[in-house]
């Protein structure tokens, strides 16, 4: 039988359509990833990938092996989780994958509710593991049963590609990106959005951040005169930059509402400058551990 990691490599390649991105997901170099795919082809005795195509696509035999690989990896991870889904002391563990900003905000609030509110789910020695990474990598972890649930942003510009036949979701929250700026000593916005005159410094997001993809289309079509000043892969850094008067940033309303209410920041523009998005919680349709099922049930009871 092929090494399990080679089957995981094939799944990553099929998901990304790129040897480079798949190698990054698998934390190996591009040449090493290519050698591993060739090793899998040698084991299979047939070409599995159409070479020289962008995006990379699988041959019919590659697609057939992919279907089997998904089942094998899923079943092995499920068996491992059932046998070792608790720490050495026998404590149940809830495994959550999410982005860094969500881990600090909405996911932290959700875990607190599971811990403190009735019905209490995280009781006794139950533990929580929260892993963060880029969404593409996190969705792979969910597909491979390395986590119980995935909490992520949802917007047409960056939908998570999870099969509805294997996974389902609930919407935990709706939010919107709003352009905000620091308020000066006279209570006026330090910067404004306008079509002419001197460009407004923009606090932008690095490509790997979910917000960069959500906001990308809006910035490309905005009539406002903006000039990039600072780029970051952290919402917290963007928030700090705005609070220090360095420019305008589109930030989640849930993050800046209190600042705007007390007069530290000011929201700019109109409704046409806002970008709405969802926060979703995904889970497998297959049965999860008792703790994960209890957390899901408690969450769905509280979600409209």
Image: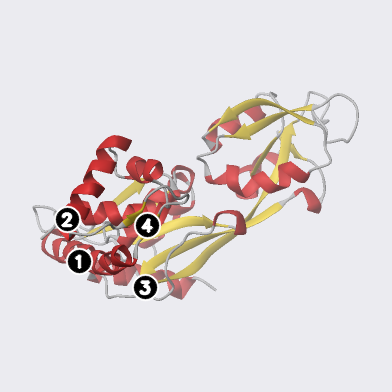
Q: Which residue is mark 4?
A: 14
Report crowding for label 4: few under 14, some 14 to 19, many 20 or more residues within 10 A (C-alpha). Answer: many
Select label 1 or label 4 by which is in front: 4
Res. 4 mark = 2
Measured in 3D between alpha carbons, the distance from the residue under mark 1 to the one under mark 4, in whole angstroms, is: 16 Å
Q: Quadrant of the N terminus?
A: bottom left
Q: Secondary structure at mark 3?
A: loop
- Residue at 65%, 24% (x, y): give it: 244
Do callouts 1 and 2 mark residues in contact (Cβ within 8 Å)?
A: yes
> Which residue is the site of mark 1?
72
- Give the mark nearer the N terminus: 1 vs 2: 2
Residue 190 in the image: x percent, y percent? 79, 27
Earlier residue among tags 2 and 3: 2
Sequence-earlier tag: 4 or 3: 4
Mark closer to the observer (2, 3): 2
Q: Give the quadrant of the C terminus.
A: bottom right
Going from N to C along the chain, the mark reached first, 3 or 1, is 1
User: Circle 1 — which element?
Assistant: helix
**Given this view, does label 4 or label 2 mark the residue nearer the observer?**
4
Label 2: which secondary element = helix
Name the residue tied to disc 3: 166
Q: Relative to 15, say whether 74 is above or below.
A: below
Q: Residues within 10 Å of mark 2 (few under 14, many from 20)?
A: few
Cα–Cα span, label 4 and label 3: 17 Å
């Amino acid at each position: 039988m092929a090494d399990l990691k080679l089957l995981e490599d094939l799944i990553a390649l099929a998901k990304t359509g790129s040897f480079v991105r798949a190698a990054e997901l698998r934390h190996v170099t591009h040449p090493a990833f290519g050698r591993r795919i060739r090793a899998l082809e040698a084991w299979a005795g047939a070409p599995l990938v159409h070479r020289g195509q962008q995006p990379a696509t699988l041959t019919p035999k590659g697609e057939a092996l992919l279907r089997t690989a998904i089942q094998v990896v899923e079943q092995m991870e499920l068996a491992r989780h059932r046998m070792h889904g608790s720490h050495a002391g026998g404590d149940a563990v809830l495994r959550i994958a999410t982005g860094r900003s969500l881990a600090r905000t909405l996911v932290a609030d959700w875990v607190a509710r599971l811990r403190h509110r009735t019905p209490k789910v995280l009781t006794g020695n139950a533990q929580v593991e929260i892993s963060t990474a880029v969404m593409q990598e996190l969705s792979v972890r969910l597909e491979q049963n390395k986590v119980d649930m995935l909490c992520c942003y949802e917007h047409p510009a960056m939908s998570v590609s999870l099969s509805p036949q294997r996974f389902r979701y609930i919407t935990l929250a709706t939010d919107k990106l709003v352009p905000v700026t620091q308020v000066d000593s006279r209570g006026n916005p330090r910067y404004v959005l306008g079509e002419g005159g001197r460009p407004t410094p923009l606090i932008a997001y690095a490509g790997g951040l979910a917000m960069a993809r959500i906001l990308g289309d809006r910035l490309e079509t905005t009539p406002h005169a903006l000039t990039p000043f600072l780029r970051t892969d952290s919402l917290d850094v963007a928030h700090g930059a705005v609070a220090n008067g360095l420019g305008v940033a589109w930030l989640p309303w849930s993050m800046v509402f209190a600042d705007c209410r007390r007069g530290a920041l000011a929201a700019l523009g109109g409704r046409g400058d806002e970008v709405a998005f969802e926060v979703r919680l995904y889970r497998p349709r297959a049965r999860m551990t008792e703790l994960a099922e209890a957390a899901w049930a408690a969450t769905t009871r509280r979600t409209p």
